[in-house]
Structure formats: structure tokens, C-alpha cells
Amino acid sequence: MTGPDEILRSARRAAERRIAQLDADIAGLRRDRSTESADDEHDPEGAPLSGEWSRLVGLREAAGKELSDVDDALHRWGAGTYGVCEHCGRPIPEARLEARPTAVRCVECAGRESR
Ligand SMILES: [Zn+2]
């Protein structure tokens, strides 16, 4: 059986890979954009790019958030508080941790919080 720390570490690697890919895509888009703005034949507003741009930036932000959530979870794992609800202090059910390894609250507290 795979331990939660292993799951977290592989989630971390996946998030890092996604961030590296997105950073490269964003850098590529930025390059395309500066080339295009110097070229009068292209749309000076760069409209088709801006949709792609905000999509990539949104994904990059989500990936960065995920990486920091995973890091927090790994920190809790190291501190021995992983899988304990930060709100009520009861253990978070295993099924929930399997579905969401970075969960910090039990289902009950998470539900209460989101209202
Ligand atoms: Zn709780």
C-alpha cells in the first residue's frame, strides 16, 4: 500500500512538472507576442493571444496553489499532524484523504466552512 507521504511526493512532482511546462508556455507566448507586435501584418491587439494568456496564467496560479497545499500537507506529515482536522482535531477519514490528499479539514468542518 502507498503511504500518504508517497502520494504527496508524487503529487508534488506532478505539480512541479506542470508549473515548469506552464512557465515555458507562458514564456513562449510572451515571445510570440513581442514578435507579433513588431509585425504590422498581425493584429496589433493580439486578441487571439490574450484568451490563451489568461487561460495559462489561471492554470499557473492553480498549479502554484496546489504545490503550496502539497508542501503544507508534507509539512504536517513531517510534524505528525497529517490527517488531523485543523478545525476540530478529529482524524480526517481515510477515504477523504485518498480523494483529496491535501485536505486539512474533515468533511463536516469543510462543509461548515464553505457555507
Ligand atoms: Zn473537523
Image (spheres, rainbow, N blue to C red):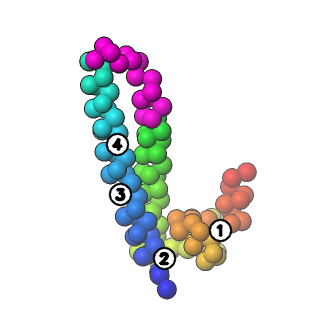
- Can residue 79 be spotted in the picture? no
Q: Amino acid at mark 3?
A: Arg
53 sits to left or right of 92: left
Secondary structure of the residue carrying numbered label 4: helix
Q: Which mark is residue 25?
A: 4
Task: Tell me whether circle 1 and circle 4 mark residues in contact (CB < 8 Å).
Answer: no
Q: Residue furthest front?
A: 41
Residue bearing the label numbered 3: 17
Task: Tell me whether circle 3 and circle 2 mark residues in contact (CB < 8 Å).
Answer: no
Q: Where residue 90 sits: x, y (%)?
A: 64, 75
Precedes in sequence: disc 3 or disc 2 = 2
Q: CA distance from mark 1 to mark 3?
A: 29 Å
67 sits to left or right of 30: right
Q: CA distance from mark 3 to mark 2?
A: 20 Å
Query: Ligand 1: does it lie within 8 Å of the C-beta at label 2?
Result: no
Residue bearing the label numbered 2: 4
The residue lying toward the viewer, choosing from 51 and 70, is 51
Precedes in sequence: disc 1 or disc 4 = 4
Q: Amino acid at mark 2?
A: Pro
Residue bearing the label numbered 1: 106
Precedes in sequence: disc 1 or disc 3 = 3
Q: CA distance from mark 1 to mark 4?
A: 37 Å
Q: Amino acid at mark 4?
A: Asp
Q: CA distance from mark 3 to mark 4?
A: 12 Å
